[in-house]
Image: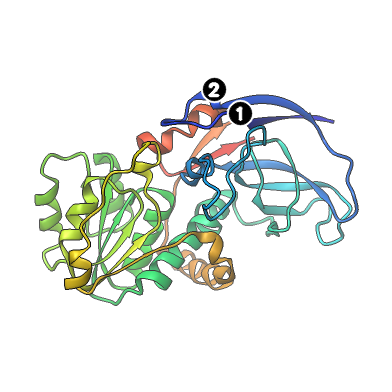
């Protein structure tokens, strides 16, 4: 049986352009013992994909090789199996690819059929685990503290802010449009939200954080980073989850001076989620609790069809996505 896939054929030097991908037709493989075939139904588009395209062997995960099917996370149904642990009809989530069919991998997990796919990809899978680890394992917030999260309207940032509110923090979000800022405050319950495109960014941040900043969840980099850094309180913590504003730059922008790390006794820690899969059971338990109490909301921006990924991925980098970016097959 033939199926459609999109391969990665050229490394980008700056922005992601359509010519770095190629649409191909492939043949489903003859299964070997313990293998299973998955028909993908929904695929996640994530900022991390830009780092997977880099020719960087020292990264946390090997780069996508030229000629390979582009890497992704997704949800699908087992349609053929020689693995008793993954019977035909089972629903799975895990590393897939930009393809209609994929061979099941060791990381795949069976998930209940009654859990909405948007809940899986927006809250219970990678975004939720990332938010949980960054907030509770890295920042370790205390009730009454002030947290600022950049990329706050994104799939991770929106969960971070809501979890922090549930734990009694003052939460300030930074996003890229007035509409997103209204959504953060009016729908998600953030205490304040700032459009990073504003001319008076420093003044707005000072007004929103009258007691300084104790925790910063960094998703984006850009001008807000230096402004937040300058308002960090002593013993503050900074979690570096992503730097989306630099992913398309050949040379990243310079970061803040380290003097305040010393004088304010700040703790700055970066992390990538592949190092923390052992925390998934606790994260799912915690996130499920928030969902059941109505303390977590999410929204998905759904694109239709595999080909939509080629141009659609750039919605992540120009800020035009309205929620978690998914492709529906």
Q: Do the residues labelled 2 and 1 touch (CB within 8 Å)?
A: yes
Q: Quadrant of the N terminus?
A: top right
- Is residue 265 in view? yes
Q: Name the residue under label 1.
A: 9
Which residue is at 40% across, 57% downward?
241
Q: Name the residue under label 2.
A: 19
- For this view, does 94 lie left or right of residue 325? right
- For this view, does 179 lie left or right of residue 158? left
Question: Which corner quadrant of the image does residue 107 belong to?
Answer: bottom right
Q: Distance between the residues labelled 2 and 1?
A: 8 Å
- Is residue 213 in view? no
- For this view, does 57 lie left or right of residue 77? left
Q: Where is residue 87 in the image (x, y as percent from the top left)?
A: 83, 56
Question: Which corner quadrant of the image does residue 166 belong to?
Answer: bottom left
- Nearer to the camera, 70 or 196: 70
Give SS at disc 1.
Answer: loop
Which residue is at 24% across, 40% downward?
178
Q: Name the disc covering residue 155, or none.
A: none
Q: Position of residue 282 (x, y in %)?
A: 54, 73
- Nearer to the camera, 123 or 188: 123
Q: Position of residue 267 (x, y in %)?
A: 30, 71
- Nearer to the camera, 102 or 268: 268
Residue closest to the far top = 19
From this view, report whether residue 34 is shown above or below residue 170: above
Q: Position of residue 43 (x, y in %)?
A: 60, 42
Give SS at disc 2.
Answer: helix
Which residue is at 44% across, 32% downward?
314
From this view, report whether residue 90 is shown above or below residue 52: below
Which residue is at 36% across, 74% downward?
140
- Nearer to the camera, 304 or 98: 98
- For this view, does 326 lie left or right of residue 202? right
Q: Quadrant of the C terminus?
A: top right
């Amino acid at each position: 049986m033939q199926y459609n896939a999109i391969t990665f054929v050229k490394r980008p030097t700056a922005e992601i352009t359509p010519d770095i991908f190629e649409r191909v037709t492939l043949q489903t493989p003859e299964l070997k013992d313990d293998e299973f075939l998955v028909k993908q139904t929904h695929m996640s588009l994530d900022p991390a994909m830009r780092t997977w395209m880099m020719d960087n062997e020292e990264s946390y995960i090997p780069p996508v090789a030229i000629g390979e099917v582009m890497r992704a996370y997704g949800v699908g149904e087992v349609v053929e199996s020689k693995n008793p642990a993954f019977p035909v009809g089972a629903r799975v989530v895990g590393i897939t690819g930009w393809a209609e069919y994929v061979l099941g991998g060791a990381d795949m997990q069976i998930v209940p059929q009654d859990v909405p796919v948007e809940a899986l990809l927006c809250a219970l899978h990678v975004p939720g685990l990332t938010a949980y680890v960054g907030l509770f394992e890295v920042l370790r917030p205390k009730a009454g503290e002030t947290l600022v999260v950049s990329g706050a309207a994104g799939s991770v940032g929106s969960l971070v802010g809501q979890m922090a509110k549930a734990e009694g923090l003052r939460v300030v979000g930074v996003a890229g449009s007035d509409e997103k800022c209204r959504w953060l405050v009016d729908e998600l319950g953030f205490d304040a939200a700032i459009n990073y495109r504003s001319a008076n960014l420093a003044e707005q941040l000072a007004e929103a954080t009258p007691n300084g900043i104790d925790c910063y969840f960094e998703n984006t980099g850009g001008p807000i980073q230096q402004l937040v850094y300058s308002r960090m309180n002593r013993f503050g913590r900074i979690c570096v989850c992503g730097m989306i504003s630099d992913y398309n730059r050949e040379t990243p922008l310079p970061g803040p001076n380290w003097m305040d790390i010393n004088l304010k006794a700040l703790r700055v820690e970066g992390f990538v989620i592949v190092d923390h899969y052992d925390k998934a059971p606790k994260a799912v338990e915690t996130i499920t609790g928030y969902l059941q109490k109505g303390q977590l909301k999410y929204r998905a921006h759904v694109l239709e069809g595999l080909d939509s990924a080629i141009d659609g991925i750039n919605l992540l980098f120009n800020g035009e996505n309205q929620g978690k970016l998914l492709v529906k097959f």
